[in-house]
Image (tube, rainbow, N blue to C red):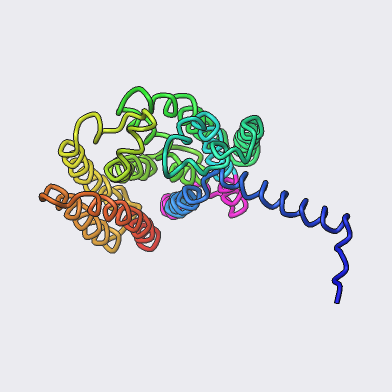
């Protein structure tokens, strides 16, 4: 029995659909969706705590619609920054095992497409925050975007201090949630910023420990390569201690209760303890991978406790 050939226009239509789907998938990949999910959680955490703070202090409160628009703007800010970061690092990404299959180094997208996509996302995101949220949130969003793309990204090839510089825009999402509600940067909002800033250091140093060869091959300056693994592990402990201390400031500032404080103490002590275990001989990359995973769980549980105990 002979099977009739598929009409040419049907075959072309199916191919076009597959191509469009692949294009969309690659554009989404440029935005680093896994990072964006974390941003959503921390931004909403900041907004939730700010709402409770505003009610407790008789301050004007933002509407749910404003917070939803702020969330959209924040997601687009991060998406734009990540896309432009991928555009600027396309050559470096091609040298690293974990990034060589990204859309640009793999040749699935033209660099110009990524560039204009990133620019469009960036312009639209800041415009949304400025027009529909407030000026403070828009300015913070623009600062995060520009500092991440124009300062942090090029410095990754020059100095290990790029980690601390990059941690500044990385810590802004919960502050965007806060300012979307209050319109100002109060002390509790600064604590949320501090938690995110300090958390990023052990989180990314853990990655650098088990991805050190990849970073070295690409010419990126990371602490394990430049200063050694021992120094890196001591930095993880130092920043974990600072993170524990700053996380406990939420209760004295009136944005968290004893439930949060107990959770912050337990989570922080556990995170610090696992970090200190890294000084034991023979822990190697398995410990670093474990610390990376635990850092994500720690942050999500801490913000959950903050929202529940606010």
Q: Residue at x 27, y 42 (%)?
A: 209
In the image, farthest residue toward the bottom: 1
In the rendered image, residue 45, in percent from the top left (x then y), is placed at 44, 53
Q: Is residue 166 left or right of residue 224?
A: right
Residue in the foreground of this view, choosing between 239 and 65: 239
Q: Is residue 79 visible?
A: yes
Residue 169 location in percent, x, y? 43, 35
Give, as a single range, the part of the protein colored magenta. Answer: 52-72
Q: Is residue 154 left or right of residue 88?
A: left
* Main secondary structure along the magenta-highlighted residues: helix
Q: Residue furthest left?
A: 281
Query: Would you place residue 116 above or below residue 59 in this image?
Result: above
Q: Is residue 98 above or below residue 123?
A: below
Q: Is residue 35 above or below residue 154?
A: below
Q: Can you see residue 130?
A: no
- Image coords of residue 38 (percent x, y): 45, 51
Quadrant of the rendered image containing residue 237:
top left
Rendered view: 156 above or below 291: above
* x then y, percent, for residue 144: 48, 33
The C terminus lies in quadrant: bottom left
**306 vs 258, nearest the viewer:** 306
């Amino acid at each position: 029995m002979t099977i009739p050939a598929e009409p040419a226009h049907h075959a072309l239509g199916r191919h076009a659909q597959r191509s469009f789907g692949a294009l969309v998938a690659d554009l989404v990949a440029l935005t680093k969706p896994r990072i964006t999910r974390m941003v959503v959680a921390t931004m909403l955490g900041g907004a939730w705590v700010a709402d409770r703070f505003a009610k407790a202090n008789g301050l004007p409160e933002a509407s749910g619609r404003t917070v939803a628009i702020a969330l959209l703007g924040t997601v687009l800010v991060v998406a734009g920054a990540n896309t432009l970061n991928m555009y600027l690092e396309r050559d470096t990404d091609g040298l690293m095992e974990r990034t060589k299959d990204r859309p640009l180094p793999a040749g699935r997208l033209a660099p110009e497409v990524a560039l204009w996509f990133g620019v469009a996302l960036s312009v639209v995101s800041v415009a949304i925050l400025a027009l529909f949220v407030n000026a403070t949130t828009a300015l913070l969003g623009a600062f995060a975007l520009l500092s991440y793309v124009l300062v942090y990204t090029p410095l990754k090839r020059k100095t290990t201090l790029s980690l601390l510089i990059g941690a500044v825009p990385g810590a802004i999402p919960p502050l965007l949630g806060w300012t979307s509600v209050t319109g100002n940067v109060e002390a509790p909002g600064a604590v949320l910023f501090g938690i995110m800033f300090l958390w990023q250091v052990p989180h990314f140093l853990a990655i650098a420990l088990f991805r050190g060869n990849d970073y070295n091959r690409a010419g990126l300056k990371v602490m394990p390569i430049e200063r050694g693994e021992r120094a890196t592990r001591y930095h993880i402990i130092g920043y974990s201690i600072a993170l524990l201390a700053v996380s406990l400031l939420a209760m004295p500032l009136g944005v968290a209760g004893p439930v949060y404080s107990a959770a912050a103490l337990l989570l922080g002590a556990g995170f610090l303890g696992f970090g200190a275990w890294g000084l034991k001989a023979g822990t190697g990359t398995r410990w670093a991978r474990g610390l990376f995973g635990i850092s994500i769980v720690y942050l999500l549980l801490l913000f959950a406790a903050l929202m529940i105990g606010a």
